[in-house]
Every structure is written in structure tokens, then in C-alpha cells.
Image (cartoon, rainbow, N blue to C red):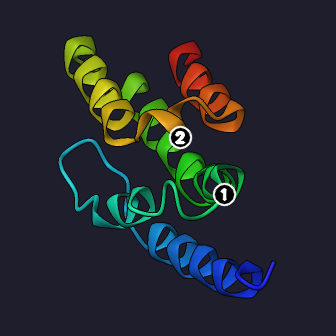
């Protein structure tokens, strides 16, 4: 449609913002993810899920894995962090198969 070029630019900008966002357990600015979530219902869910898959989840998985391997890891804190990230994503994004796969992979660590 006529919106495809605009949506492509929006997705690219959202991806860049998320790629530049550090992912760490000790608190962070999640505004880039909230910016992406604001596009649910406007941009295609598959496109938004692809952005999360390529820009967020590789860093998210690394932060989670490193935290779980740290001496004295408090698993209740890890669970709260995981649940916080999951809650940050609107239901439509959580239901996307790419996002479900990444969240499930996080539980396997």
C-alpha cells in the first residue's frame, strides 16, 4: 500500500533506537521499546516483532544469560526482571510467534 515506505522508515528508526539501548538487569531506559509498542495497531505486528527479534532480543538474551551465570544470582530478581519485560510488551506483540519463541528461549537459560 501507499503506507509501506513510511512504515519501513518508522520500523528502521525504531530498530535503531532499540539497538542503541543497553539491556541490563540493574535498571535502564525502556523508552525505545515503549516507542515501538505505541505503533501496535498501526504498523504490522510481524514488522514490529521482527524489530524486537533483531534489535532487542539478542542483547536481552545475553544480559539474561550473563546474569544467570553470575555468582550469587538471585533467581527471584531474575524472574521479576523477565516478567517486567514481558509485561512491557502489549499482548498483540507477546502473541507474535517470534516474540513467544524469544521469551520461551529466555526461560530455557
Q: Observer-nearest residue: 37 or 21?
A: 37
Residue 36 in percent (x, y) is at 45, 62
Residue at 38% from the left image edge and 31% from the top image edge: 86
The quadrant where residue 74 appears:
top left
Q: Quadrant of the N terminus?
A: bottom right
Residue marked by disc 1: 44
Q: Height in image: 63 above or below 101? A: below
Q: Would residue 43 be found to the left or right of residue 2 on screen?
A: left
Taking the view exactly as shown, the residue that stands out farthest to the right is 1
Q: Height in image: 3 above or below 74? A: below
The quadrant where residue 66 appears:
top left
The answer to which of marks 2 and 1 sits earlier in the sequence is: 1
Taking the view exactly as shown, the residue that stands out farthest to the front is 1
Report crowding for label 1: few under 14, some 14 to 19, many 20 or more residues within 10 A (C-alpha): few
Q: Quadrant of the C terminus?
A: top right
Residue at 40% from the left image edge and 23% from the top image edge: 68
Residue marked by disc 2: 93
Numbered badge on residue 69:
none
Q: Height in image: 52 above or below 74? A: below
Asked which secondary structure carries label 2, the reply is helix
Report crowding for label 2: few under 14, some 14 to 19, many 20 or more residues within 10 A (C-alpha): many
Asked which secondary structure carries label 1, the reply is loop
Residue 94 in percent (x, y) is at 51, 32
Residue at 47% from the left image edge and 67% from the top image edge: 18
Amino acid at each position: 500500500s501507499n503506507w509501506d515506505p513510511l512504515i519501513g522508515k518508522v520500523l528502521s528508526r525504531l530498530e535503531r533506537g532499540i539497538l542503541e539501548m543497553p539491556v541490563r538487569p540493574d535498571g535502564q531506559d525502556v523508552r525505545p521499546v515503549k516507542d515501538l509498542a505505541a505503533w501496535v495497531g498501526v504498523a504490522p505486528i510481524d514488522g514490529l516483532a521482527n524489530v524486537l527479534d533483531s534489535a532487542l532480543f539478542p542483547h536481552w538474551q545475553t544480559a539474561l544469560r550473563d546474569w544467570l551465570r553470575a555468582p550469587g544470582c538471585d533467581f527471584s530478581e531474575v524472574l521479576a526482571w523477565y516478567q517486567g519485560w514481558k509485561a512491557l510488551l502489549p499482548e498483540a506483540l507477546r502473541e507474535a510467534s517470534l516474540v513467544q519463541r524469544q521469551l520461551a528461549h529466555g526461560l530455557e537459560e
